[in-house]
Amino acid sequence: MEKIDQMVKSSGGHYETEEHVSEELKEKERTISRRAEQRRTDSLKRTTGLPKDTGLTDLRILLLGRGNSGKSSAGNTILGGSGFKVSQTDQRSAQCEVRQGSVAGRHVTVVESPGWFYNHPLQDTSEMDKLKIQDSVSLCPPGPHAVLLAVPLRYAFTKAQRVAVEEHMTLLSQSVWSHAIVLFTHGDHLGDRSIEQHIEAEGEDLRWLVDTCGDRYHVFNNQKTDDTQVTELLQKMEEMVAGNRGGHYEDGGDVSETTSERKKIREEHVHTLMTKIQRQITALKALFEGEHQSLPEVKVMLVGGEQDQRSRAGNLILKDQVFKQTPLKEFKTQTKLTECVRQQRRVAGRKVSVVNCPDWSTTPPSQKTKEVLLHGVTLCSPGPHTVLVTVDVRSSFCEADRRSVEEHMELLGDRVWRRALVLFTRGWWLGGRRVEEYIEAEGEPLRRILEKCGYRYHVLNSSNVDISEVTELMEKIEDMVMRDRGHFGQMTLIKRLRGRTEEQWKKREQEMIERMRSVTTEPEEPTLPAVRRRNSMQWFPPSMSGGTRSSGFDTMSVVSSQAETDETRQKTLFERLTGVKTLTAEEWKKREEELIETMLTFVMTEPQEPSMSGDTPSAKVSDWLNRHPGRIALSSGHDTMSIAPPSQVDTGDVTSVRDEDVS
């Protein structure tokens, strides 16, 4: 109060608006009131003469709108119960939900469709959400009498909101507007103002929506407990149905049958995807069983997606608010990263370093972009254990996104894909659906990136991620590094070379073939769901996309090239002194990768397909395990997938990570 008194004294009194400004405001209010009254009058005239009761005993309603628009609460208000789950967190209705009840002597069916994100245009909405919105019509066959567009009054209705509604309504046919009613939710936010005054004051975008819906609108105030707002809504629906000559919305053809066929095809594709991956999981598990070690330090780079998405993921991984997060763009101007930023914390018994990289554009990367990315590599010298390619499951992943990811990843060298893992962020948006459904729905662009990453992926589910999700991610990174021969211990040169003789390779080769043979069974129909933790598969095989087979991460070219040169020289010296033929780490890796890739190729073949014969790798895996027609049995009870270097190689004590170990 003292500060206020001081301010009043210094300013010489209270604030006074200029007379002309005050008059302009009053005139604007009078204009709004006149237009609101005219809208109310026109609405009454439009319904005059229409029957208030068409005799409908079975009423079908479809609820559409953005996420968190109050659809679930509106459905409960209509049915007078709590059938639709209402979440107070960031969870949302991700599936089409159907509830039924008796209301005012009618049998009422209410279908709630999944919402799109905030003001996302249609092109940014995931294909999975688009399909669910289209599928919702089939859940109230032969079609809904009324489509209620939920618009929350607690938010401004901007041009972006209008575009989002208009574009998402195109998922249905143009005739849907003849059956649409704007349902304003959170009516308590109106205060003393009428809904007509709000419509006129909000501007042309909201007026366009109301007019396009034939000036049909209604308000739900969930603070009210009486039934009048429901009976009034039903009356407006009756009037609309009468105006439509008793008809309901039809999408053309047999909607129910068409949708059922589409769903069946999608489910079969998801089944096939998960089955193939699971076969590979089982094969790799057998090949490297019991050879897992833990990294004392994990270094990761976050790339792709939007800055806020990566920052949020980095904070979840480090369990601390170390990267700046920004609210929605409409509320605050976002300061874009122009350089890579590194943060470190101790997580799940490990030292974890996360490097957050700047945004990628959809245009070809510049030299400056390459310099920034390579600088990010130096921040986790000698190089990151993994590159996490972030993908937001709320959004679509189109061809432009695929091209951008590939062009930018190529700046880090050919080997980067062997250390890449797709990190699906905002997993809560899936709402219990499998991430494989999202992958299948997005189609070829996303599948190509996953293929290059060896189908390695992980899902971070929520803003309050459980530590187990981070631990699982760390284990996947360790498995990937071990599979790629990123040894964790310090070894002398002699120990390493003794572990890579031709004789040791033959033993390793035979061991892998026998392990492969041990999990080969007669063909059988796999059982879904595949083994996975939460929404992510446990381990995925190396890339079979035709890229380079050499493992490691060659962005730190000076370090790795020098290490390879030194090892080659020392290998030559060792062979001269001992007379024993040895393999460099690169030669060993190449042989093992060729053998594994050949094995996995056979794993994916159909039972009736004849096996190939020929020379190495290992006589085409012993002529496909002696021309065995079976497949790899699906794992049924394993919880992890451990991938590690050959047991014959002495890795020494696990104390630190050397430059060559992560190259």
Image (cartoon, helix red, strand yellow):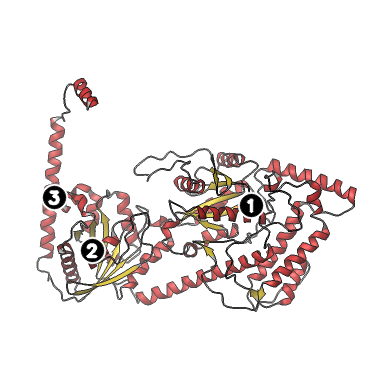
State the CA–CA distance, disc 2 to disc 3.
30 Å
The kind of residue on which mark 2 rests is: Thr
Q: Which mark is residue 462?
A: none
Which amino acid, mark 3?
Answer: Arg
**Residue 11 in view (yes/no):** yes
Label 2 sits on residue: 77
Q: Amino acid at mark 1?
A: Ser
Q: Are marks 2 and 3 in contact (CB under 8 Å)?
A: no
For the point 30% across and 53% down, which residue is it? 162
State the image coordinates of residue 358 (x, y, percent, origin top left): 51, 42
Between label 3 and label 1, give the one nearer the viewer. Answer: 1
Please indicate whether residue 254 sits to the left or right of residue 320 in the image: left
Residue 617's image quarter?
bottom right
Precedes in sequence: disc 2 or disc 3 = 3
Q: Which residue is mark 3?
A: 35
Q: Secondary structure at mark 3?
A: helix
Q: Find out whether the residues at labels 3 and 1 contact each other: C-beta distance under 8 Å.
A: no
Q: Which residue is mark 1?
A: 294
- Earlier along the polypeptide chain: callout 3 or callout 1? 3
Tell which tag, 2 or 1, sits nearer the viewer.
1
Q: CA distance from mark 2 to mark 1?
A: 53 Å
Q: Is residue 252 above or below residue 646?
A: below
